[in-house]
Image (cartoon, rainbow, N blue to C red):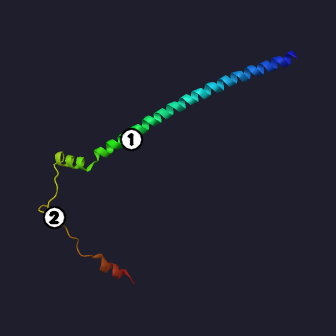
Amino acid sequence: MTRINALLLLAVVATAIYLVRVQYESRRLFSELDKAHSQARHLAMDVERLEVEKRAQASPGRVERLAREKLDMRQPNPGITTYMGFPADKTAPSAQAAKP
């Protein structure tokens, strides 16, 4: 009977140690999950902030102002605009000649 009691005591102690280890692991994983959720919230805020900044940087007014100030560009007017015409379609006769 003493042997059975000792074996049962050993089983209870082993189970208690396993339970403590599992609870510790569970708390550690919950803490990591909480940190990951917090980091995800911060990253989502950063993405939103960067998208707003990108829209502000790419606004047409800002691009036009920078082109005018830094690149010395200006709006084209008809006096300085050269219009180029395409020559007549020369590929059409050769395409017709290739057809049987």
* Residue behind mark 1: 48
Q: Is residue 27 above or below residue 49?
A: above
Q: Nearer the viewer, mark 1 or mark 2?
A: 1
Q: Is residue 43 above or below residue 20?
A: below
Left-right relation of 9 to 82 = right
Q: Quadrant of residue 16?
A: top right
Left-right relation of 12 to 96 = right
| Residue 35, horizontal then vertical, whole percent | 50, 30
Q: Residues within 10 Å of mark 1 (few under 14, many from 20)?
A: few
Quarter of the picture holding the C terminus: bottom left
Q: Amino acid at mark 2?
A: Thr
Q: Residue at x 74, y 19 (%)?
A: 13
Along the viewing direction, whichever of 88 and 65 lies nearer the viewer: 65
Q: Quadrant of residue 80?
A: bottom left
Question: Which secondary structure, mark 2?
Answer: loop
Q: Amino acid at mark 1?
A: Glu
Residue 82: which disc? 2
Residue 32: which disc? none
| Residue 36, horizontal then vertical, whole percent | 50, 33
Q: Is residue 86 above or below residue 50?
A: below
Q: Residue at x 57, y 30 (%)?
A: 30
Q: Residue at x 40, y 37 (%)?
A: 45
